[in-house]
């Protein structure tokens, strides 16, 4: 087959999908659209920007260490690259998104502690607002504007979306791209979950694979490889390295494992939270089995892996919330579930929400808002507060060097400090030998002995950061080395990781505190 004929075939196939998309739109109940896409986006953007400012807690190290930290190193010439970058497991595509942001802040002399802390999340909030808009569009195409309204309400009110969506995780951006592609109903897919959905929708699956998936996949892979070749300075096939570490060798298990059913019984259910009954009802009554199948397939696929995290399945959380929106729309007006040929116009007989609707809204808000605010403003805020404090102190020239005696990657790093000062943290690079403890684990096992050896082999930093659980064991040693407590920040009310990390403490050496 020639290149010309292949291009024609691909155009014809895209046109057929476009026609199918238009047909589906025309068959959707004719609900009146009271607001425009621009108004929806403006509202979502304002909401997500406020959301990003309210997120002041620490969730996952990758939010800082695999995105802004890498971009900061490229933009300013200093920053830490974790072991994944040394082994070619990470792609530079996601960190480079923050590079223009840092350049602009530096150019405008706005690279102050406040902006360095907030700007990356504010940028992500723009992407998140795009995701919200396309969730609305997808819901409108599938079920009409009434369902779209409540699907958007479900997404904006869900505690985990509030907690996670504005964070600078690659999973947050993946969620946005997932919603964009699903809404557009295009064949161009991002990630295995979307390939699966498009495959299920395709009539001629063999042609779909060879004429759509293969060319687009090859193009994306080629561009990514060229980008990584330029950044790494050598040819690195990141997807293959990532596959080898996480799937073929179960390298991810180094960071902990869960039972196979964890996503179904704990992980995803906690993410959906009080939307669960509405989600289940929406699945049953909507009969959108392809999206239900996609949801089940993704959860099932990630259940095979030993290492599990909430954020891994974030891209399919909006699908569950669309079903929640369908259920809410049915409570507001049962005619939503009527076949399109029987129900062509949205019922206007209800000027007020029925009692059941009011109860459902109050229930969702009363359960999700406290959870969202507690997790975003209270739980594990210590690492963010301590780095904000050190950044301000360093900005005034009061910090000379820092030692982090915490579990590794437990705080942000240079991307928030934004000063090229000597810093050191406990290493946790996975060992090829089983049973060998890394530096972080050795410290947690015997902090006093570790500190004594460190004092004999290294120079003393001006500041030491550690959690209260270890500080209680090391207080006498720190005082003997002429350190005093400078600042204490609340962190958590209950156990984090292995201990109750109630607060984060900053110790400063007396000789430096007098400067």
Image: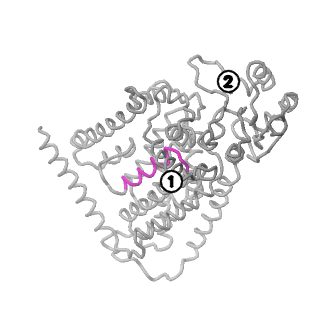
Magenta part of the protein: which range?
Answer: 167-182
Residue 19 in the magenta stretch? The answer is: no
State the image quarter where residue 359 is shown. Answer: bottom right
Residues 481 and 361: in front is: 481
Tell me which residue sits at (62%, 60%) in the image.
368
* Residue 176 drawn above or below residue 427: below
Image coords of residue 3 (percent x, y)? 14, 40
Q: Estimate the spatial distance between the alpha carbons at disc 2 and disc 1, rounded to whole Å.
A: 35 Å
In this rendering, would 420 be left or right of 235? right
Q: Are marks 2 and 1 in contact (CB under 8 Å)?
A: no
Helix, strand or loop for the magenta stretch, by majority: helix
* Residue 397 drawn above or below residue 443: below
Label 1 crowd bin: few (<14), some (14–19), many (20+), radius 10 Å: some
Residues 395 and 128: in front is: 395
What secondary structure is marked by label 1? helix
In this rendering, would 240 be left or right of 514? left
Label 2 crowd bin: few (<14), some (14–19), many (20+), radius 10 Å: some
Tell me which residue sits at (33%, 38%) in the image.
223
Identify the residue under disc 1.
123
Circle number at residue 439: 2
Question: Number of labelled discs?
Answer: 2
């Amino acid at each position: 087959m020639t290149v010309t004929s292949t291009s024609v075939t691909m155009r014809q196939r895209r046109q057929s999908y476009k026609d199918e998309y238009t047909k589906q739109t025309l068959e959707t109940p004719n609900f009146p659209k009271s607001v425009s896409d621009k108004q929806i986006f403006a509202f979502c953007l304002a909401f997500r920007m406020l959301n990003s400012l309210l997120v002041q807690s620490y969730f996952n190290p990758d939010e800082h260490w695999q995105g802004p930290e890498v971009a900061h190193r490229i933009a300013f010439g200093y920053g830490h690259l974790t072991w994944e970058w040394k082994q070619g497991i990470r792609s530079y595509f996601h960190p480079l998104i923050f590079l223009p942001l840092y350049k602009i802040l530096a150019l405008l002399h706005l690279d102050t502690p406040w902006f360095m802390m907030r700007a990356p999340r504010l940028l992500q909030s723009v992407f998140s607002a795009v995701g919200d808009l396309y969730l609305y569009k997808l819901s409108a195409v599938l079920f009409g504007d009434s369902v779209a309204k409540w699907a958007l309400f479900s997404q904006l009110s869900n505690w985990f979306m509030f907690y996670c969506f504005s964070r600078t995780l690659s999973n947050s951006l993946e969620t946005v791209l997932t919603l964009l592609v699903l809404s557009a109903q295009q064949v161009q897919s991002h990630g295995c979950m979307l390939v699966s959905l498009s495959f299920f929708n395709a009539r001629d699956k063999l042609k779909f694979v060879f004429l759509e998936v293969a060319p687009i996949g090859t193009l994306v892979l080629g561009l990514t490889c060229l980008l990584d070749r330029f950044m790494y300075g050598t040819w690195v096939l990141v997807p293959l390295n990532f596959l080898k570490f996480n799937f073929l060798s179960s390298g991810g298990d180094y960071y902990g494992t869960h039972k196979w059913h964890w996503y179904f019984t704990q992980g995803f259910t906690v993410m959906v939270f009080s939307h669960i009954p509405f989600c289940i009802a929406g699945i049953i009554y909507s009969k959108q089995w392809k999206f239900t199948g996609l949801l089940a397939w993704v959860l099932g696929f990630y259940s095979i892996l030993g290492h599990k995290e909430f954020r891994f399945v974030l891209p399919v959380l909006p699908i569950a919330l669309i079903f929640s929106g369908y259920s809410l729309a049915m409570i507001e007006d049962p005619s939503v579930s009527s076949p399109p040929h029987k129900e062509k116009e949205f019922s206007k007989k209800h000027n007020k929400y029925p009692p059941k609707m009011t109860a459902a809204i109050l229930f969702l808000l009363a359960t999700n808002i406290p959870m969202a605010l507690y997790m975003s403003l209270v739980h594990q805020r210590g690492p963010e507060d301590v780095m904000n404090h050190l950044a301000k102190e360093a900005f005034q020239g009061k910090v000379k060097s820092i030692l982090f005696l915490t579990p590794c990657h437990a705080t942000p790093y240079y991307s928030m400090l934004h000063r090229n000062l000597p810093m050191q943290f406990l290493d946790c690079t996975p060992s090829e030998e089983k049973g060998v403890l890394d530096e972080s684990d050795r410290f947690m096992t015997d902090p006093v002995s570790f500190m004594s050896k460190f004092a004999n082999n290294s120079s003393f930093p001006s500041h030491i950061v550690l959690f209260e659980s270890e500080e209680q064991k090391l207080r006498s040693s720190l005082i003997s080395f002429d350190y005093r407590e400078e600042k204490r920040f609340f962190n958590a009310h209950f156990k984090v990781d292995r201990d109750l990390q109630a607060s984060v403490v900053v110790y400063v050496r007396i000789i430096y505190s007098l400067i």
